[in-house]
Amino acid sequence: MRSEEHLLVEEQSISLKDSETSSKSEYIKNTSEEIATDKPRCLDDDYEVVYKRPKTLVDVSMHYCPGCAHSLVHKLIMEVVDEMGIQETTVGVAPVGCSVFAYDYMNIDMTEAAHGRATAVATGIKRLMPDKYVFTYQGDGDLAAIGIAETIHAINRGENFMIVFMNNAVYGMTSGQMAPTTLAGMKTTTSPLGRDTAFYGEPIRVSELISHLPGSFYVTRQAVNSATAVRKAKKAISNAFKYQKLRKGTCFVEIIGNCPSNWKMTPIEAAKFVDESMIKTFPLGDIKLPKGEDLKLLQEDK
Ligand SMILES: Cc1ncc(C[n+]2csc(CCOP(=O)(O)OP(=O)(O)O)c2C)c(N)n1
Ligand code: SF4
Ligand SMILES: [Mg+2]
């Protein structure tokens, strides 16, 4: 049912059409009658539903800033869980960081880990329940700073779970301090003159680093700053879930996450910043792909 506002718009637009319509009042009367009997167009059988909220994504307002990547990536993970029908068999591990309350939004079994320790917690879960789909969801401060040791050792052991690594180049939750992934020259609250690489070192490319570990099975870097990027990121998450069935090692999905608040940008500027700056240091694409014979096993398993 269209609202009164719509009627007002109709009313305004009719003044432009006076010459075509017999009388303004007659037009409004006819339009109102039509509206009164009309069912919403979206319920019309002729319309195909092309988008709806995944049922495993809890229907609440999220605490994230406008334009933040976390909410979008939560949705992508839940879409894959819905599509694969694995709500009952998926276990997630939430980090410390802006996404600390991820368990409030994903309607699956989830637990919280101490800062940086998500991969250690996930190791325990997956080893006790090898048939579950297990994943960690971690920021760059969590995974690449305080948790870098757990990350490298878990992947080196080839732990059979997915890591979703949200790289927004800062410690978002604690007001934007420099992270191991902060770009060269990038200003943060602890590098107000810009990251000086001679002093702080180069940003760590975690995906490239861990791709050299024999335990990593699938390593990819994606973004969510455009519709195309979002589709590719979802595909990567979907692949990583499916590859768990093969029990061949750790699947690592890095996602360049927009953090408009700490980048001091509007959401649109932040989306552009990903293309113009972030991906120069963190190029997008697959970094390590499973071998053909492994993928064949997956197809046979279907
Ligand atoms: C043991 C410990 N050290 C430090 C902190 C403070 N702290 C909370 S979140 C955070 C950084 C989070 O950054 P990141 O993982 O990149 O997540 P983001 O907020 O950017 O998504 C830090 C240092 C803490 N909570 N616990
Ligand atoms: S501070 Fe950044 S990472 Fe945290 S919720 Fe806001 S936009 Fe997202
Ligand atoms: Mg971060």
Image: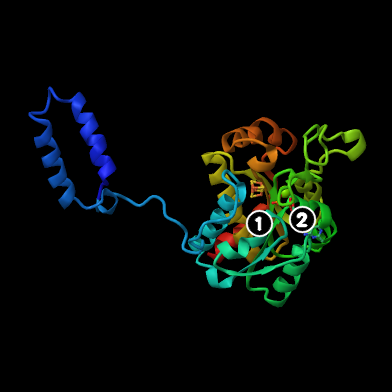
Task: Residue at the far top: name it.
Answer: 19
Foreground: 257 or 250? 257
> Disc 1 marks which residue?
99
Task: Residue at the far right: name it.
Answer: 199
Q: Is residue 243 left or right of residue 191?
A: left
Q: Would the CB of label 1 be found within 8 Å of ligand 1?
A: yes
Q: Position of residue 141 (x, y in %)?
A: 77, 51
Q: Would the CB of label 2 be found within 8 Å of ligand 1?
A: yes
Q: Amino acid at mark 2?
A: Asp
Secondary structure of the residue carrying numbered label 2: helix
In the figure, 302 relative to 144: above or below? below
Secondary structure of the residue carrying numbered label 1: helix
Identify the residue at horizontal 70%, vertical 71% (top origin). Answer: 126
Identify the residue at horizontal 39%, vertical 50% (top origin). Answer: 50
Q: Position of residue 49 (x, y in %)?
A: 35, 52
Identify the residue at horizontal 59%, vertical 55% (top origin). Answer: 63
Return the mark for residue 244.
none
Return the mark for residue 142.
2
